[in-house]
Amino acid sequence: MDHIQKSWSTFIIIAQMAEEEEKRMSSKKFNVALAGATGAVGKQMIACLEESDFPVDRIKLLASNRSKGRELSFKNQSVKVEEMTEDSFGGMDIALFSAGGGTSTHFAPYATKAGCVVVDNSSAWRMDPDVPLVVPEVNPHAVAGYTKKGIIANPNCSTIQMVVALNPIHQKYRIKRVVVSTYQAVSGTGIKAMDELSDQTRAIMNFSETESNVYPHQIAFNCLPHIDVFQENGYTKEEMKMLNETRKIMEDDSIQVTATTVRVPVFYGHSEAVNIETEGPISAEDVKSMLAEAPGVKVVDDPSRNVYPMPIDAAGQDLTYVGRIRDDFSIPNGINMWIVADNIRKGAATNTVQIAEILAQDYL
Ligand code: A2P
């Protein structure tokens, strides 16, 4: 009897400790620095942090000295933007970076030295073998690798939405090869590019001359098969990112990806025409039902009613929309589909905040 009573009290003590630990974890709050807070992605990160109810204790908004003193709002409180310096990160737990590759290369090591975990949206650290590259719907377990360098990389926007749709197919059918053409919005280049598209559109409608400062050619009423810089192999850096990052996120170097990335005069939302070849037989019907159950995906596919994903519908949303799912009759095992997502949200800010949530919940 005594023995039973003792076990019962031990059980109660353990249950109380577990409850206390859970309470402690759920009430744990984090000091968060946002590097590049005034940019297109940075502003969206502020919105995502507010919407997701991320447990923020103190927020620090960082940008260049041009924005020093500007006021932005976080949860209805006005917050002054500070100039990012090497000393900006003391006392911060997590730093979300979206201030360009050069800025990340320079400042991220200062942030990690100050004890802060960096989630970086630039391409600076993505292919570093000691830095995990994470899309929460695909490889959330990779977050654990943050301990090596204190940095987690957020993938390229066009790659994120593609792998969200590819991963469930790969798990069941093993993808051999992907041929992708992208139709990418100007917001991916930043606020100045959005201004350039507006200014050029207005100028053309008023029969005036246009000026191109951000892109090498007019973007209004045009398409530029040129995103990021050209490489010696004839592809652009963006096209090579789609190959290398897909392999790293999906943890399979055998997948072949060939890409043509195109900038189009759309403000928000990247679209992609994707052709997939699998090892074994695959059917559009099965892909449709599989993707209907896949995390982060919404199938929008009813051609009889002219229903398919479009950037104007994806803008402001966090899901990846897939439609035009059809068998490719030109090869034995092939599928064609059309993938659309908001490049600033799922392609950047949302994915970054989702990574930070995993980090905060499971690791910090
Ligand atoms: P700022 O607004 O002060 O120039 P976008 O990609 O939309 O152009 O935004 C880029 C973001 O990166 C902006 O917040 C920008 O700040 C910030 N940024 C650019 N260069 C630096 C730098 N050297 N130090 C800190 N922030 C920077």
Image: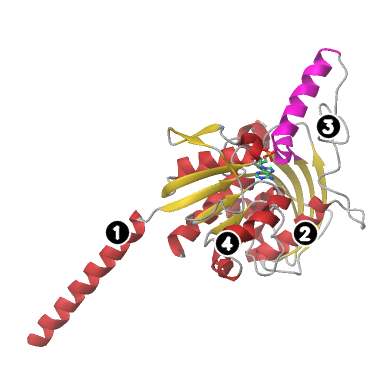
Label 2 secondary element: helix
Tell me where the magenta segment starts and ends, as one range. 184-207
Q: Note whether ligand 1 is within 8 Å of mark 3.
A: no
Q: Amino acid at mark 4?
A: Thr
Q: Note whether ligand 1 is within 8 Å of mark 2.
A: no
Q: Amino acid at mark 3?
A: Asn
Q: CA distance from mark 4 to mark 1?
A: 28 Å
Q: Is residue 190 magenta?
A: yes
Q: CA distance from mark 4 to mark 3?
A: 35 Å
Query: x, y (%) of residue 72?
Result: 52, 33
Inspect this view and state whether residue 191 appears: yes
Q: Which residue is mark 3?
A: 213
**Quick one: label 3, few (<14), some, or many (20+) residues within 10 Å?**
few
Indicate which disc, 4 or 3, sits on the residue closer to the N terminus. Answer: 4
Q: CA distance from mark 1 to mark 3?
A: 53 Å
Indicate which disc, 1 or 3, sits on the residue closer to the N terminus. Answer: 1
Query: x, y (%) of residue 108?
Result: 63, 57
Quarter of the image holding residue 206?
top right
Q: Which residue is mark 1?
A: 23
Indicate which disc, 2 or 1, sits on the residue closer to the N terminus. Answer: 1
Q: Nearer the viewer, mark 2 or mark 4?
A: 4
